[in-house]
Amino acid sequence: MRPSSRLPRESAPNALSRAVDELRRSDTRYLDLTESNPTRAGIPYPDDLLRPLSAPAALRYEPNPLGLAAAREAVAADCGRRGARIDPEHVVLSASTSEMYAWLFKLLCDAGESVLVPRPSYPLFEHLTRLEGVRAGSYRLEYHGRWEIDLDSMAAAPADTRAVLLVSPNNPTGSFASAREIDQLFRLCRDRQWALIVDEVFADYVLDAEAPVTDVAARAEVLTFSMGGASKSLGLPQVKLGWTVVGGPAADRAAALDGLELIADTFLSVGTPVQVAASVLLERGAAVRANLAAARRIASAHPACDLLPVEGGWSAVVRVPATRSEETLVLDLLSRERILVHPGYFFDFEHEAFVIVSLLVPEAEFADGLARTLGFAEAA
Ligand SMILES: Cc1ncc(COP(=O)(O)O)c(C=O)c1O
């Protein structure tokens, strides 16, 4: 078979994944400070949590491309927890936010057109765009005590750009876009006729941020899509439910909802049981605060390392002495201390040296692993 050019060409695993594979093959234990699967993080899920999926109503199949009314109402009501007023008619369900990215690229872009993605950020954008035949241009987030959007870096966007992607809070920097930045983005999007796609999957995990802006679509001045999902908000990636609120000028919003209805109707990918259960499931969440407190305590004992502020989300970024390359550091840490962390370059950080750890790791392991990681990074 000749694979299409939508698939990435190179497939050789990087040095860190090869080292991890080797440890697994030889059954060597290591401490994984990158664990971001909530179902492996020791969260005490109640045994009956998924019982609502077997409600009798789930035995009926009544496909509705944008989602069952009760589930869309539950999502809209849940946005009210953060103070947003959402019309359920403006909510679209998908199996995940990753799937929604694909739908939005189908909606907004012809093949070969571009979207702008933040750097550093979520590493899957390269695949999500490429698989849809869309190009990913990038704009920069710069760290000046907090992560700020470098709007000037958007000026060079190609003329065929159709949308700008904002991840707020961002993965892995944890930074929320500020109200001022969002207003600036609205202006830029209006001038350039770009749509705004806001990935708010971590919006429920507010840590250091004081007045985080969430539910951007609810106050949008341009066509805007605010995305959330069960995998992060509920710590339940396996139930496969994502949601998107469409906001902005009424005519654009109506056209976008029509287009999404056709796309969603082509796949009808969201299961009925999870939609029936949505209102019950939306009452729960996961906890990451204890690890952030431990990270602060540990970092203060390692003055050469700097734990950057974590405005929200599930990960923490630590600046470590750049006495060796990030790659050497993470490989040595794995082979000598048996601790796995992610290097900043996995997320396109502009310079070295950063390590990224997941705040979902069980508390005692997290504290032990991070203390040893920072000690190791300092000792170089
Ligand atoms: C910023 C961000 N957006 C989206 C996703 C994907 O979430 P989903 O499970 O809804 O596809 C992730 C998963 O890690 C993420 O970090």
Image (cartoon, rainbow, N blue to C red):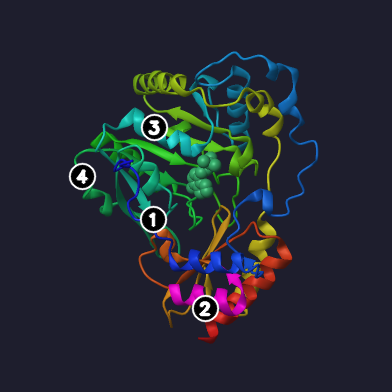
Tell me if label 2 and label 1 are in contact, CB under 8 Å. no
Instruction: Report helix, strand or loop for mark 4.
Output: loop
Depicted 320 relative to depicted 235: above or below: below
First of labels 3, 1 by sequence position = 1
Of badges 3 and 2, nearer the viewer stands 2
Distance between the Cα atoms at labels 3 and 2?
41 Å
Residue at which label 4 appears: 158
* Mark 4 crowd level (few <14, some 14–19, many ≥20, 10 Å Cα): some
Name the amino acid, label 1: Ser
User: Seen in the image, is 23 located left or right of residue 6?
Assistant: right
Name the amino acid, label 4: Pro
Residue at which label 3 appears: 104
Tell me if label 4 and label 2 are in contact, CB under 8 Å. no
Q: Quadrant of residue 335 in the image? A: bottom right
Is residue 130 among the parts visible in the rendering?
Answer: yes
Residue at which label 2 appears: 332
